[in-house]
Amino acid sequence: MMRTVLIGSLAFLLTDCVSWGQASSSLSFEVASVKPAASSQWRESKAGSDRVDFPNVTLRYCIAFAYGLKEYQVSGPNWFSELRFDIVAKGPGGTRREQLPEMMQALLAQRFKLQVRRETKEFSVFALVVGKNGPKLKESQPESGGEAAGAKFGMSMSPSGVGRLEVKNATMAALANTLARILGRPVVDLTALTGRYDLDLEYSMEDGNGMRMAPPSGGAIQAAAEPGVSIFGSIQQFGLKLDARKLPLPAIAVEQAEKSPTEN
């Protein structure tokens, strides 16, 4: 009996390793097109209920989508962030949205001969946390008709170099993702807040080293922002805080990948 249990446990561990080392999933797209990007113009990537439309994306972006991580959690050669592809794929009838990442794993393994290894790495991040006096947030009001709506973010920059971030109907995870773009460093949501919120934030050019805002038409942005303006101070008005930390997070290390995808 003991021997049977040990063999079963070993088989489970081996299966778990294979699932990360190479795509072993039976889920796959019914049709897929993978080509070098036809245009350098940015277009929004979309993942629908049964399909993906990823124009002008990097392989790092696709791997992050496939394994449910952020791009900074994927390590590999420089070309992962340089070469760009147009990927359009559709699942068979009955495909659910949550199955698309697993299908992407299979597609990347097939077309790029991708093999990866799961690991845990320490990252320098900003942790989005609740302040000591608790959150002071305004919950979003449901839109007319009661239909669920996604988060909306509006960004602008004044001639004096003060940025404004207008947040509507956003989860804390969505807010963290947008703050990461501004700060140029990963932001991890550790608030444990589950609602959707509206808030307006200000940030300075010094904060915004991650996003290079274009100057307003008719003049250049001044180098210095208004005194005291900071994303760190602005977010504290809502009972939140950004803490610089080093955190161990799941990561993907690419062991093998080919630059040129196999033919469609």
Image (cartoon, helix red, strand yellow):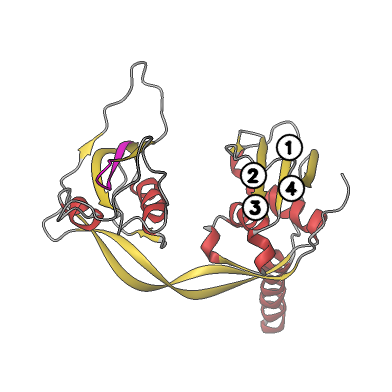
In the picture of the structure, the residue carrying the numbered disc 4 is 27
Amino acid at pointer 2: Gln
In the picture of the structure, the residue carrying the numbered disc 1 is 91
CA gap, disc 4 to disc 1? 9 Å
Magenta residue check for 104: no
In the picture of the structure, the residue carrying the numbered disc 2 is 99
Amino acid at pointer 4: Leu
- Single out the residue that lies furthest toward the left: 133
Quadrant of the drawing holding the N terminus: bottom right
Of the residues under marks 4 and 3, which one precedes in the sequence? 4
Disc 4 secondary structure class: loop
Segment tinted magenta in the rendering: 158-168
Q: In this rendering, which labeled residue sits more in front, label 4 or label 1?
A: 1
Of the residues under marks 2 and 4, which one precedes in the sequence? 4
Which residue is at the front of the view, 16 or 193?
193
Where residue 229 sits: x, y (%)? 19, 53
CA gap, disc 1 to disc 2? 9 Å
Which residue is at the front of the view, 221 or 164?
221
Where residue 264 sits: x, y (%)? 87, 44
CA gap, disc 4 to disc 3? 17 Å
CA gap, disc 3 to disc 1? 16 Å
Q: In this rendering, which labeled residue sits more in front, label 4 or label 3?
A: 3
Of the residues under marks 2 and 3, which one precedes in the sequence? 3
Disc 1 secondary structure class: loop
